Image: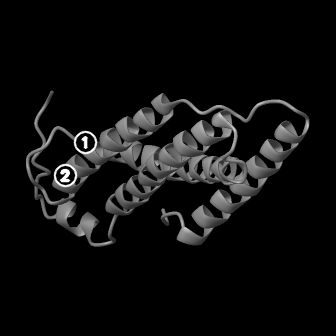
Amino acid sequence: MKPLSVTNLLLVGAAAAVCAACVTVVVVALGAGPILVSPALALSFLLVSALIAWGGVHVKRLRAHRETWMTPLGALRVAMFARASSMAGALFAGGLVGIAGVAFTRLDADAMLATACIASLSACAALVWCVVGAVVERWCVVDPHDDDDAQNGEGRGTRPL
């Protein structure tokens, strides 16, 4: 499996930013308030990032033949979750940047100021989520030489739960 390219992540983020900015401009032009963003969103992004990083550390331990609870099937699950998370993080980061960008144009309104600040904070957390997902996905890439070690009888150092 080839890891996601950084170019694809940037394109997804840019497309999401443009779409979110257009929707926000239309909503505000129609007289409604800006799209509200909860600060809990940033916390949830950081929590998911921590979970991915924790799984990634155990995948690295598995690949280094050190003792861990991770199995090869679990490593595949971590890799797929990291891949999906990096895409979702890019999507959310781009969308939140688009919302914050429009909100920063009208800081005279209190709701726009609050939206701009919280959306910027959440966009930073989503960017962390995207980067952690991309890094962990690269940790999970299998080298062609890994099969040689398994055929030589070297154990993986796993222990049952």
Look at the numbered disc 1 and give the secondary structure of its residue. Answer: loop
* Residue 102 image offset from top left, x and y in percent: 72, 51
Q: Residue at x 48, y 64 (%)?
A: 3
For the residue pair 94 and 131, the one nearer the viewer reads as: 94
Q: Is residue 61 left or right of residue 27?
A: left
Judged from this view, the residue extending furthest toward the front is 108
Find residue 135 and report its horizontal and vertical position in percent: 37, 60
Q: Residue at x 78, y 43 (%)?
A: 24
Give the residue type at disc 1: Thr
Task: Please state the horizontal and vertical placement of residue 14, each as a whole percent of the image.
Answer: 68, 62
Residue found 71% across the figure and 34% down from its top: 35
Q: Is residue 140 left or right of residue 114?
A: left
**Number of residues whose C-alpha sits closer than 10 Å to that of mark 2, classed few (under 14), some (14–19) or many (20 or more):** many
Give the labeled residue for mark 1.
71
Dot 2 corresponds to which residue?
62
Mark 1 and mark 2 in contact (Cβ < 8 Å)? yes
Q: Of 10 and 139, which appears nearest the observer?
A: 10
Mark found first going from the N terminus, 2 or 1: 2
91 vs 151: above or below: above
Question: x, y (%) of residue 84?
Answer: 52, 47
The amino acid type, in three-letter code, at marker 2 is Leu
Q: Is residue 71 visible?
A: yes
Does residue 73 appear anywhere in the picture? Answer: no
